[in-house]
Image (cartoon, rainbow, N blue to C red):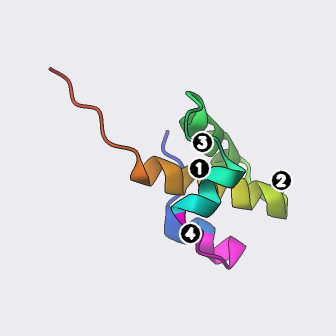
Amino acid sequence: MQPMKLAEVRKHTGRQLTYAEAIRLANPGDPFLRNMAIALSLHTWNNTAQDWLRLEAALVILHHKPRRTCR
């Protein structure tokens, strides 16, 4: 399962969070950040304005995280 695309979420929030703003709304060190983004993407009709911001923050943080590579 993939979370929503960042561009789709920004249509709902009407904002474009920077990384600095995103880390105030969601913890970049949270190991379950991706799970939170997926959960908020599943039932979007139930999202409040704050939920949409948390989803955007999670996606911004995930976008900036370095990718893991297998060795």
Q: Which amino acid does label 4 sit on?
A: Glu
Q: Which quarter of the image is occupied by the C terminus? A: top left
Q: Do the residues labelled 2 and 4 touch (CB within 8 Å)?
A: no
| Neighbourhood count class around disc 1 (C-alpha, 10 Å): few under 14, some 14–19, many 20 upward | many
Question: Is 67 on the left-hand or right-hand side of 6?
Answer: left
Q: Which stretch did the figure color magenta? A: 10-18
Residue at image location 70% in from the left, 72% down from the top: 13
Residue at the spot 61% in from the left edge and 51% down from the top edge:
23
- Label 2 CA crowd tier, 10 Å (few <14, some 14–19, many 20+): few
- Near-viewer residue (18 or 45): 18
Callout in the foreground (1, 4): 1
User: How far apart in space, not on screen, are marks 1 and 4 (Cα)?
Assistant: 14 Å
User: What x and y, as percent, mark residue 70?
Assistant: 20, 24
In the displayed structure, does residue 54 sit left or right of residue 48?
Answer: left
Instruction: State left or right for residue 66 relative to residue 43.
Output: left
The reply to whether callout 1 and callout 4 are in contact (CB within 8 Å) is no
Q: Name the residue under label 2.
A: 46
Q: Name the residue under label 3.
A: 38
| Circle number at residue 9 | none
Residue 44 falls in image quadrant: bottom right
Dot 1 or dot 4, earlier in sequence: 4
Mark 4 lies on residue:
8
- From the viewer's side, name the closer residue of 4 and 23: 23
Determine whether the residue tagged by mark 4 lies in a helix, strand or loop: helix
- Of the numbered discs 3 and 1, the one sitting upstream in the chain is 3
At a point 69% along the width and 53% down the height, the residue shown is: 24
